[in-house]
Structures are given as C-alpha cells and as structure tokens.
Image (cartoon, rainbow, N blue to C red):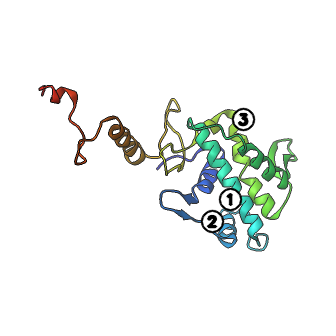
Amino acid sequence: MTAAAPHELDLVIDFVNTRDLEEGTDALSTPQDLAAWLAKRRLGTARTLVLDERDHRHAVNLREALRSLMLANNGGPPAQRAGRELERAARRGEVGIHFADDGSASLAPGAGGFAGALARLLIPVADALGDGSWQRVKACRAPGCHWAFYDRSRNRSGVWCQMAVCGNRTKVRAYRERIPARPGGRVAASRRRAAGGS
C-alpha cells in the first residue's frame, strides 16, 4: 500500500481528481454532489452545506486552479491566474493563524459553512509550500489526462500518473510522430533496414 502524501495532500489530490478528463466524468457535477463530497470528507455537514450554483462555480474554479498549479509543477505553463483563485477562496474562508492553549499554531479557516469547507482544502497546500513538498504534487503531462498525483520519485522527476499507461502512450505517440508513415498507414522502416542492414 502506498504511503499517504504529507500534510494531507491526498485530500487536495482527490479534490482535483473529481474531474476525470480521460473518462469525461465529474463527481462534482451538481451542487448536491459537491456537498456530499465535502461532507464525506468531514469538511462540513449536510446542515452547513446547502449549496447553490454560485458555490458550485467557486469550487470548480478552485479545482481547476489547483490543477493548473499542479501542471506547472510538472513543467507545464505557468499558472498565472491560479493564485488569485486560491487567494479568493482563502479570503472567503477567512484563513488565518490560530493558536492553541499550549502555544502551538496552525492555519485554519475562521469562517464556517461552505466558505470554511473550501478553505480547508488550501491548508495542506500552504503547509506543503512551507517545506517544498508542494513541488511533488503534479498533474500528469499526458494530453487529455492531467490526473493529479504525488511524485514519489527520488529526484522529483515523475511526469505521468502511471508510466505503464500514460507514459507508454506518450512514448508511442512521440515515436509515431518521429517516424514518417508509409502509404497504407504502416510506419516506414528504419534507415538501417532500408539500406540493407539487419
């Protein structure tokens, strides 16, 4: 069994993966689906999570902003506006430093309800930014996939959610693009074979 990612980053990864681009599915397709997802993860209750279309739109915007940051962590284009979306969610949720009786400090939302629930998804991101582990949270580079994952490679070099699937597909696609096709659709023989080599 794979160990959990630090700082409860698995929660953020699961949130981004509620939309499966490859399958064309979205586990958060309605406000009710979103409320159920948040409640199941103890980010709110059925009583505090009565959501409307505007709430749903905020959540989807946050999810896609996080995905774009994860793509940027994986060599993708800079996610120039994603930070603004995270900032809006943090402000709505009144995220701040809170001190316990023993003097320990933690980040937590000051708001309750939906705004607080959505803001709780940002706490693992902030914690991971503090120690650099956020750079390991990536979205798969494969076109049409962009599945979020935690890169456990020693040198942070992982680029695909699954090498056996997306990695192989990408390599085959790149190979086919490099090798010109023969008439009839077959890949042209290598130069060595064409020149009489074995």
Marks 3/1: CA distance?
25 Å
Residue 115: % across, % down:
80, 60
Label 2 sits on residue: 28
Name the front one of labels 2 and 3.
Answer: 2
> In what element is the residue under mark 1?
helix
Marks 1/2: CA distance?
8 Å
Disc nearer the start of the sequence (1/2): 2
Quadrant (top left, top right, bottom left, bottom right) of the C terminus: top left
Residue 130 - label:
3
Residue 170: % across, % down:
40, 42
Judge whether 37 appears above or below 62 on screen: below
* Left or right: 127, with 193 as reference point: right
User: Which one is nearer the viewer's eye here, 115 or 24?
Assistant: 24
Q: Residue 139 occupies which quadrant of the picture?
A: top right
Label 1 sits on residue: 60
Judge whether 153 appears above or below 19 on screen: above
User: Which one is nearer the viewer's eye here, 181 or 37?
Assistant: 181
- Mark 3 residue type: Gly
